[in-house]
Image (cartoon, grey):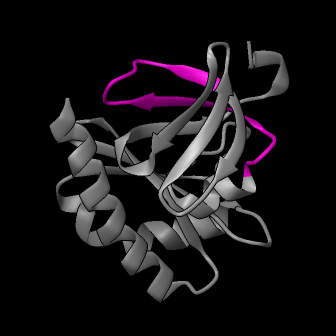
């Protein structure tokens, strides 16, 4: 399973560079493998995400279409969180995290610095280094418990 997350991180670095260079103002939030030959790229921009933007991102990623089925998506209500700046914007919000050590952790983001995010969970505040997070998403308040 660790290889899946390593592959996602590698793809995310590659894809972020390509997309953000070709389409200034577009941010790649996350890349998630949905199978051995399929991945989803979550993108965002200040003006929002529409079908035309998803099509432009797909064209930028045309080289990947030889090996993968590529889906491009807006972040949606369960916005992916992967980078320190994502977690800084989420302070005060509820999140669901998956790490290499923990299958699932839910709580409120109370702090986020350059090294780790601090989440207030049922068993107190927990500092989680970004390098150990394999999935992170905002969750709606009603889903927080």
Bounds of the magenta segment: 90-106
Q: Quadrant of the C terminus?
A: top right
Q: How many marks?
A: 0
Residue 132: quarter of image: top left
Whether residue 36 is visible here, answered yes or no, is no
Residue 29: quarter of image: bottom right
Q: Position of residue 86 (x, y in %)?
A: 62, 57
Q: Is residue 102 left or right of residue 142?
A: left
Whether residue 109 is visible here, answered yes or no, is yes
Judging depth in this view, the residue of 56 and 76 nearest the camera is 76
Is 92 included in the stretch rendered in magenta? Answer: yes
- The image shows residue 79, relative to residue 54, as above or below, that is above
Q: In percent of the image, x 53 and y 73: which residue is there?
A: 56
Q: In percent of the image, x 71 and y 30: which residue is there?
A: 139
Residue 66: quarter of image: bottom left
Q: Is residue 27 left or right of residue 40?
A: right
Judging depth in this view, the residue of 141 and 64 nearest the camera is 141
Q: Is residue 140 left or right of residue 122?
A: right
Q: Position of residue 47 (x, y in %)?
A: 80, 72
Judging depth in this view, the residue of 96 and 126 nearest the camera is 126
Q: Position of residue 19 (x, y in %)?
A: 45, 76
Judging depth in this view, the residue of 123 and 109 nearest the camera is 123
Is 128 included in the stretch rendered in magenta? Answer: no
Q: In percent of the image, x 74 and y 39: which residue is there?
A: 77
Q: Quadrant of the N terminus?
A: top left
Q: In percent of the image, x 81 and y 42: which residue is there?
A: 92
């Amino acid at each position: 399973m660790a290889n899946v997350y390593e592959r996602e991180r590698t793809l995310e670095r590659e894809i972020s560079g390509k997309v953000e260079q070709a389409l200034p103002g577009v941010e790649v939030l996350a890349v998630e493998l949905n199978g051995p030959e399929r991945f989803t790229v979550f993108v965002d921009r200040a003006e929002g995400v529409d079908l035309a933007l998803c099509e432009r991102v797909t064209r930028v990623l045309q080289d990947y279409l030889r090996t993968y089925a590529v889906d491009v998506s807006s972040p949606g209500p369960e916005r992916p969180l992967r980078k320190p700046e994502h977690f800084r914007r989420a302070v005060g919000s509820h999140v669901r995290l998956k790490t290499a050590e923990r299958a699932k952790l839910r709580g409120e983001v109370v702090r986020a610095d350059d090294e780790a995010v601090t989440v207030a969970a049922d068993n107190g505040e927990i500092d989680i280094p970004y390098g150990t997070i394999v999935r992170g998403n905002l969750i709606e308040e009603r889903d927080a418990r």
